[in-house]
Amino acid sequence: MLRRVPRALRGAVVVTVLLAVVASIAQSWMSGTPGAAGYVQTQWGPLGPADRDLLVKVRLAGLWEAPTGSQAETQASRADIQQVGSNLHTEHNELDRITREAADQLGVLLPSSPNDQQIAWMEEISALTGTEYDRMFVQRLREAHGVVLPLIAQVRVGTRNELMREFATTANEFVTRHIGYLEGTGLVDYSDLPEPPSPGLLSAERGPADLIVPGLVVLAALLAAGALLSAVRRRPTPRAAVPTAVADPPVTGRAIAAIAMPRPRPATTTSSGAYRITDTGLDTRVDDLCEPADRRYDDHPRAGDLTDTGPIPRVTDTGPRHAVRR
């Protein structure tokens, strides 16, 4: 059965299945989801992927925002911004302690250093001075707090874990207060902040990673359709049926005799001299053809007799014979 399927179609299906499996494994690794549904049981209720992700994101935020706030206490050019830096430094240390305690109780592993993007932001801010430092410090931290706040709200309204509801409530208070500190400086450029997600495929509940598997399914359908179309086009056109030779009728004895007998050749009426020449030899004299029928045989000289013109040749089956004078 499988041999009848075109090779191109079989290859497309195999490649697509492998891509789907690899994508599913990659999604599990990226989200850190153990088990089929990504939930584990705890004494506070089920702990899901979004719960673990929030703990990791809040921990990462504290790893770079606390030291950056501490830096702003001495490097910022304005006193109010120095105070904002001090508040962020102190409160992020407190929020980080709460995050680590919740993660320990729920058995969630947390990172120990900022990620590459956060390190790049720290280097970018540290390289500036004066008002440029103030503006970049406020803008980058306001942008970072705006990213983590929606995650906190989603977990707070949807988590099945009681401890995570308490943590999300506390984290929401910290982050909302920090946004107020930063916006109070008057240096936030709102036009440079990321726009809210629009409703649709990439809305709050879905991201680009969620479209990997559906995209592979669509790709598989397109590859299968293309391979099938290619196989149909390459299929050889059926040849026209060769007509079966009609058998000759049986040859009977009478037919064999008719085939063996020579066909009579048409007589030629050319003449030479006094005799008619035919395909089989000389025939009677031409003059005899004009004689009356009653004299043609009765009064005709006998073969071998002498006439004024000489002996009449004797006509036999094998040709004319001349009489021999004795």
Image (tube, rainbow, N blue to C red):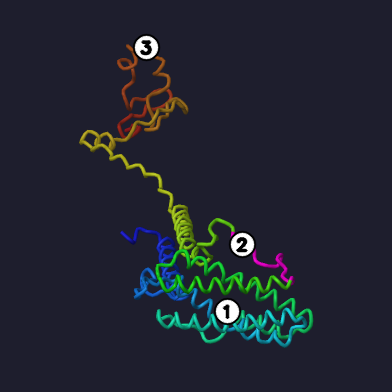
Quadrant where the C terminus is found in the figure: top left
Which range is magenta?
186-197
Would residue 139 appear left or right of 108 to someone viewing this image?
A: right
Q: Earlier in the sequence, mark 1 or mark 3?
A: 1
Residue identifier under label 1: 61
Q: Mark 1, mark 3: which one is toward the viewer?
A: 1
| Residue 137 rendering spot, x and y as whole percentages | 70, 78
Residue for point 66% across, 74% down: 181
Mark 2 sits on what residue? 196
Looking at the picture, tell me which residue is in the foreground, 90 or 5.
90
What is the secondary structure assignment of the residue under circle 2? loop
Q: Amino acid at mark 3?
A: Pro
Q: Identify residue for label 3.
A: 292
Q: Indicate yes or no whether the magenta region holds residue 59.
A: no
Mark 3 or mark 2: name the one nearer the start of the chain.
2
The secondary element bearing badge 3 is classed as loop
Q: Amino acid at mark 2?
A: Pro
In terms of image quadrants, where is residue 287? Answer: top left
Distance between the alpha carbons at the discs numbered 1 and 2: 20 Å
How far apart, in angstroms, are the residues tagged by discs 3 and 2? 134 Å
The image shows residue 27 at horizontal and vertical percentages of: 46, 71
